[in-house]
Image (cartoon, rainbow, N blue to C red):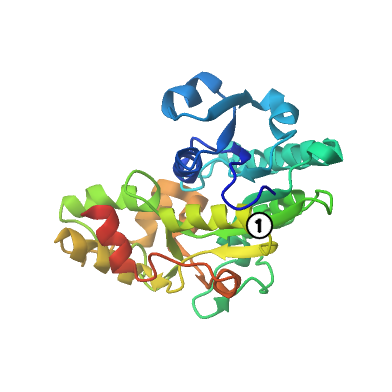
Amino acid sequence: MAAAGDKLTIAVTGATGLVGSRLAAKLAAQGNKVRVLTRNVSSAKAKLQYPGLEFYSLAQITEAVKGADAVVNLAGEPIGTRWTPAIKKQIKQSRLDITSKVASAISNSPEASRPEVFVSSSAVGYYGASATASFTEDSPAGNDYLAQICTEPWEEALGQICTEWEAAAKNVPASTRSVIIRTGIVLARDGGVLARMLPIFELFAGGPLGTGKQWVSWIHRDDLVDMIIDAIKKPAYSGVYNGTAPKPVTMAQLCSSVGGVLGRPSWLPVPDFAITTLLGEGAQVVLEGQKVLPTRAQQAGFNFKYTELPDALRNLLK
């Protein structure tokens, strides 16, 4: 890796997404060269108009990876939608296919031009859902559907998909440092869970989803971007890290905090059946949760800007 302060060349998949777009903007603002790997080059160019960006189609993965100092893999279809059989297949394949192709391109690069670090996203769905347990990076995988994306065959569970996803990301040579970030609920005004909640609260109809007792392991988007950049630049980062804030909350606490910041009530709960009707099996993403702690990130000395949910929401919503 280049010396501290030197400019880097970084290839990024998923650069047009909620996290990737902010990451690309910050890396470019720091003077780095960002290679955007995308399915639609023209659309990506229209969305990401920063100096220092180069654009590559997915057919050009080899060229984009070769000679890069680092590769960041954030690609994947959103999971907060209704899970039809076709969508479930896309959720899995969009993660496994791109991750496998990027890892293969890294492995096949000549050693002299091979990236020094590969940072790949996973999800806290790896751990499965629990109302009582706390999870750190050492906790085992769950056995629900999201855990399977992060682990074993799709038909069996979500934590298992995460395991397969992570296994694909680890399939790089030992000379390339591998970092996996299991991301929680990313808070941003312009996308994700928070953006979907705001219109409901603005209509004075906000309230907990389901029982409100399920855990929400959240993180401010800017903190997640900074954690990824730390993982790129600091050689001490290696292995798995939880991309969550140190103080997870329940869904009821999240909704109460959103209502408080907006000056709107948050007492009207949305029942399980209404969410299930809308999202089908995908409802488990919001009706079930897990209490995930960023133990290794804190041990690495990562400096969270937003450790308290109300502070994060005030920054995003005021």
Residue type beneath disc 1: Ile
List the single residue furthest toward the bottom.
132
Q: Which residue is mark 1?
A: 180
User: Which is nearer the eye, 164 or 59?
Assistant: 59
Q: Is residue 95 left or right of residue 15?
A: right
Any part of residue 155 in sight: no
79 lies left or right of 9: left
Question: Residue 31, position in %: x, y?
Answer: 51, 38
Q: Position of residue 2 (x, y in %)?
A: 67, 47
- As helix, strand or loop, the secondary structure at mark 1 comes to strand
In this rendering, the answer to whether 143 lies above or below 53 is: below
Residue located at (49% from left, 76% from top): 131
- Residue closer to the observer: 99 or 157: 99
Q: Residue at x 60, y 37 (%)?
A: 13
Residue at x 55%, y 40% (from the top left corner):
77
Up/down of 294 relative to 232, above or below:
below
Residue 114 occupies which quadrant of the picture? top right
> Where residue 233 sits in the image (x, y, percent)?
61, 54
